Image (cartoon, rainbow, N blue to C red):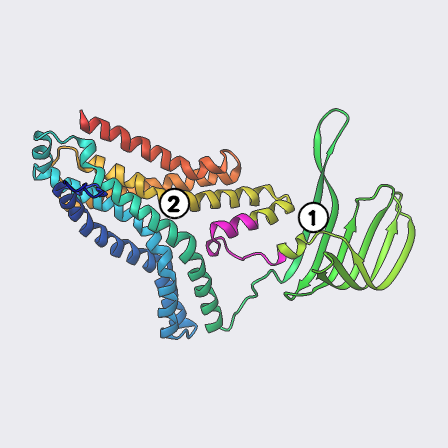
């Protein structure tokens, strides 16, 4: 009696060609990470730290720690550029040595040849997203705090002065047009992390009477979701400017929005926020009705998402250029790589500026360079396949 064959899970096999091309890609990729990370750290951080060591007395050990904390940000930026360098150098070498011609002569088409480059690009895309969204924000924040403590210039993790929060509502007029109208203005001269000081609140939300509240201090009552104001005065003013009533108090509770507190406690820098934190911050910024700041943050959020996918774009562009019949040495490949990187990031800067100005949507501002690069790479690949 024959035994039934056991079920076996067959995994796709990696061919000798794939291993060979991946090996050709790996060495220039690692070289690119070291090169571009070193350049980025030198230009973006190292020179400034050296100046602080010599002029401000920053300890050398602290400077090394800050340099290491800044490294994840520049590694994430180096990944896409390293993919471009690796694909350009590897496929250019295979093409100049006629190995591409040999592979095509045995029936392997161009699209099959670039699969290792695409696989590498996708792996690096995942790594870039993780580092850029999880590691970099925390590392940047620690680097900032370490530098501030070392120089005795620690800034609070909140906005400590001039908390200004305008609250608007949309009004529809008889002709059908809509406009934003100020209904409340909250101002605090100082915030120590727990308590607002020297407050002035202008309330225009009630018809027939305007209200001005001044208070020495105020705190947010979390259990009751109200503001507790202490030692202040409430002025009730009629529309013609005459006083209706003046009320002095030692303690007064008002059910106002806690948005001013959220506004004061927001993070200080976009590069210290993850995508989730940036989206939370966006809800607070929208309350301020500052359209330019809203667009700027929306572009930044989309930029955090689009940056990792530059690896795929550069991988396809680099492979498409490198695989074309040519006789290109490593120096030429490196020069082409630098030119493409400069062109891409210049386009990215212009595109993001257009998004901040409101000429294009934040999505298009962040993704337009990727779409153009992907289109260019696909066109080059089709031309090479003919």
Image-quadrant location for residue 10: top left
Magenta part mainly helix, strand or loop?
Answer: helix
Q: Which image quarter holds the C terminus? A: top left
- Of the numbered discs 1 and 2, the one sitting upstream in the chain is 1
How many C-alpha atoms fall within 10 Å of the one at disc 1: few (<14), some, or many (≥20)? Answer: some
Residue pictured at 67% horizontal, 54% vertical: 260
- In the rendered image, residue 291, in percent from the top left (x then y), is placed at 59, 41
Using residue 300 as the reference point, say whether residue 17 is left or right of it.
left
Q: Is residue 112 left or right of residue 263?
A: left
Q: Residue at x 13, y 45 (%)?
A: 20
Q: Position of residue 361 (x, y in %)?
A: 50, 35
**In the rendered image of this protein, does residue 24 appear above or below residue 37?**
above
Q: Where are the magenta residues, as a range?
A: 264-281
Give the number of the disc on residue 166: 1
Can you tell which of label 1 and label 2 is closer to the viewer?
A: 2
- Residue 92 can be seen in this image: yes
Q: Residue at x 26, y 37 (%)?
A: 316
**Furthest-front residue in view?**
1
Tell me which corner region of the image, top left, top right, bottom left or bottom right, holds residue 227.
Answer: bottom right
Q: Mark 2: give few (<14), some (14-19) or many (20+) Cα within 10 Å.
A: some
Identify which residue, 18 or 241, lies in the foreground: 18
In this rendering, the answer to whether 66 lies above or below 210 is below
- Horizontal relation, residue 82 to residue 244: left or right: left
Residue at disc 1, secondary structure = strand
* Screen quadrant of the N terminus: top left
Circle 2 is placed at which residue position?
307
In space, the residues marked 1 and 2 are separated at their CA atoms by 34 Å
Q: Secondary structure at mark 2?
A: helix
Q: Nearer the viewer, residue 249 or 329?
A: 249
**Taking 63 as reference, is 329 left or right?**
left
């Amino acid at each position: 009696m024959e035994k039934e064959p056991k079920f076996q899970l067959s995994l796709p096999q990696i061919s000798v060609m794939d291993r060979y091309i991946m090996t050709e890609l790996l060495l220039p990729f690692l070289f690119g990470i070291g090169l571009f990370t070193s350049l980025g750290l030198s230009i973006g951080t190292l020179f400034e730290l050296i100046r602080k060591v010599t002029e401000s007395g920053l300890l050398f050990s602290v400077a090394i720690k800050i340099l290491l904390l800044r490294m994840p940000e520049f590694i994430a930026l180096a990944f896409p550029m390293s993919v471009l360098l690796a694909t350009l150098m590897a496929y250019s070498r295979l093409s100049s040595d006629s190995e591409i011609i040999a592979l095509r002569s045995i029936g392997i088409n161009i699209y099959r040849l670039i699969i290792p480059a695409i696989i590498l690009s996708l792996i690096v895309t995942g790594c870039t997203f993780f580092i850029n969204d999880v590691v970099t924000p925390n590392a940047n924040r620690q680097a900032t705090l370490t530098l501030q403590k070392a120089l005795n210039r620690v800034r609070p993790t909140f906005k400590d002065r001039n908390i200004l929060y305008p609250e608007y509502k949309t009004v529809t007029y008889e002709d059908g047009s809509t406009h934003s109208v100020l209904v409340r203005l909250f101002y605090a001269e100082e915030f120590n992390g727990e308590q607002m000081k020297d407050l002035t609140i202008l309330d225009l939300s009630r018809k027939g009477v305007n209200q001005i509240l001044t208070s020495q201090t105020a705190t947010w009552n979390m259990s009751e979701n109200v503001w507790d104001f202490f030692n202040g005065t409430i002025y009730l003013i009629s529309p013609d400017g005459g006083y209706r009533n003046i009320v002095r108090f030692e303690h007064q509770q008002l059910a106002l929005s806690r948005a001013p507190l959220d506004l004061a406690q927001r993070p200080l820098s976009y590069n210290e926020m993850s995508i989730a934190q940036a989206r939370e911050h966006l809800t607070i910024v929208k309350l301020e009705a500052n359209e330019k700041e809203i667009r700027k943050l929306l572009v930044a959020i989309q930029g955090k998402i689009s940056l990792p996918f530059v690896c795929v774009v550069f991988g396809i562009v680099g492979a498409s250029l490198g695989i074309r019949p040519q006789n290109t040495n490593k120096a030429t490949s490196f020069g082409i790589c630098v030119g493409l990187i400069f062109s891409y990031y210049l386009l990215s800067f212009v595109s993001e500026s257009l998004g901040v100005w409101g000429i294009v949507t934040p999505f298009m501002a962040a993704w337009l360079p990727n779409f153009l690069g992907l289109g260019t790479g696909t066109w080059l690949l089709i031309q090479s396949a003919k």
